[in-house]
Amino acid sequence: MLTTIIYRSHICDDVPVKALEDMVAAANHHNRHENVTGILLFNGTHFFQLLEGPAESVTAIYQHICCDPRHHNVVELLRDHGPSRRFGNVGMELFDLRHYDRDDVLQSVLDKGTTKYQMTYNDRALQFFRTFVEATEKANYFELPPADSWEFIPEETALSVQPEVVAPGADCSFAFQPIVDPFMQEVVSWEALIRSPGGESPGAYFDALPREELYERDLKSKQVALSMASALGLQDQTLSLNLLPMTLVNVPSAVDFLLTAIEANGFVPEQIVVEFTESEAISRFEEFTSAVRQLKSAGISVTIDHFGAGFAGLQLLAQFQPDRIKINRDLIMDVHKSGPRQAIIQAIIKCCASLEIQFCAVGVEKAEEWMWLESAGISQFQGHLFASPRLGGIPAIAWPEKKFGF
Ligand code: C2E
Ligand code: MN
């Protein structure tokens, strides 16, 4: 199958531009052998390359290219399949945009094409050429420093050195993980994540319950979360609690139960955030929104969790606007390398900004992910990079520190 990959990258400072011709000649030798063709554009700072050929060869060459130390910030823009090559004549031609007149540079690139694509402006690949040549997307090229220019060293605090607390007699326990603002070095909120008493995952805990008790137990467990949070001394912090949306609908007086538990453990509703973990479609939407109105009237904030995954999508946001959304890990993962993820996250940010909804990125594991997200305008993060959940306790937080010399 004929596969096309397009990527963009940034030349490393120490690579002399003169060396490029040799580099391309060497690569060409290999590409020809693999039956991979394409074109490489260079604008003095950035590369933009289209690779075409058999799927395995293109993928293998692209993986190799990603590891090349002569460039960095490699972002995959397109991966697609088509009937014929766009640039099939030459192995891999280097096209230096600086040697052409601004007005006809795009046409000069397209003249290198070998097929009817030459004039087919509805071809996605050729539209990527246009945006690169015309530099219309340049504001979105975030030049990230290397991942190892930051250090993440967990810092113990008075809260984190406390011994583990247990909830005596309870059939569940909780792990706590912070949502952080690394720039301000502040904890935005502590999320309580349900566990079995032995520390097993939420999935394991809920799967072991009889189906008909699910919602009731989900709600009741929040009393345990609040009492553990209280025992850990989080009374002056914000606390995030997860609930299935149908818990509020199916359990009578659920909001009153929550309010009682909040007060009994020394919290006020304004400190509490309820995150709706949208694992099931909200079937009784009217009743759900009515319960949300009760939460909001009492002072509790509302978050849509797992935004961008499955049900927690655009339609939900069109029908009801929360105080915050949490962008799901599936979208966050390797965002620094993926054009589609970058475009989607930027659209989510823009949408939230228009609606004055706060947003947070969940599941951040790599320094590059955090740097890209921070550059895009996200300031709140949750993930192993900063702190992993700790069962019955408060984890130490690793705040990013710029390393000396960077
Ligand atoms: P969630 O609300 O999105 O919680 C974050 C999940 O991501 C947690 O998984 C956490 O351990 C994990 N996580 C955090 N940082 C990272 C990271 O950097 N990388 C990766 N790979 N994962 C990270 P956990 O604790 O297994 O919880 C899974 C889900 O279970 C939660 O997702 C939430 O939807 C649900 N859940 C947790 N507690 C409750 C609860 O009390 N009630 C209900 N209904 N659902 C709950
Ligand atoms: Mn959550």
Image (cartoon, grey):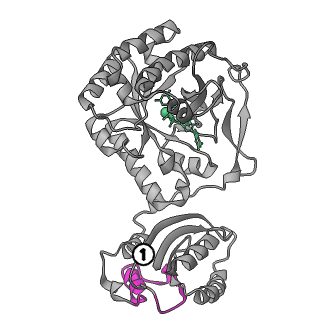
Residue 21 visible within the image: no
Q: Read off the magenta span.
A: 88-114
Residue at figure coordinates x 66%, y 53% from the top left:
147
Answer with the quarter of the image where residue 159 lies: top right
> x and y percent of residue 269 in the render?
43, 15
Depth check: 72 or 385 in front?
385
Q: Position of residue 107 (x, y in %)?
A: 37, 84
Q: Position of residue 394 (x, y in %)?
A: 65, 25
Within 8 Å of ligand 1, the CB of disc 1? no
User: Please, which residue is most extreme toward the right here?
Assistant: 404
Residue at 54%, 84% (x, y): give it.
36
Residue in the image at 63% along x and 88% along y: 25
Whether 93 is among the magenta residues is: yes
Residue nearer the viewer, 161 or 336: 161
Q: Where is residue 319 in the image (x, y as percent from the top left)?
A: 26, 37
- The answer to which quarter of the image holds residue 30 is bottom right
Q: Is mark 1 on a helix, strand or loop?
A: strand
The amino acid sitting under disc 1 is His
Q: How crowded is mark 1: few (under 14 residues within 10 Å), some or many (20 or more)?
A: some
The residue located at (47%, 76%) in the rendering is 4
**Which residue lies most toward the top here?**
264
Residue furthest left as drawn: 286
Residue located beneath label 1 in the image? 81
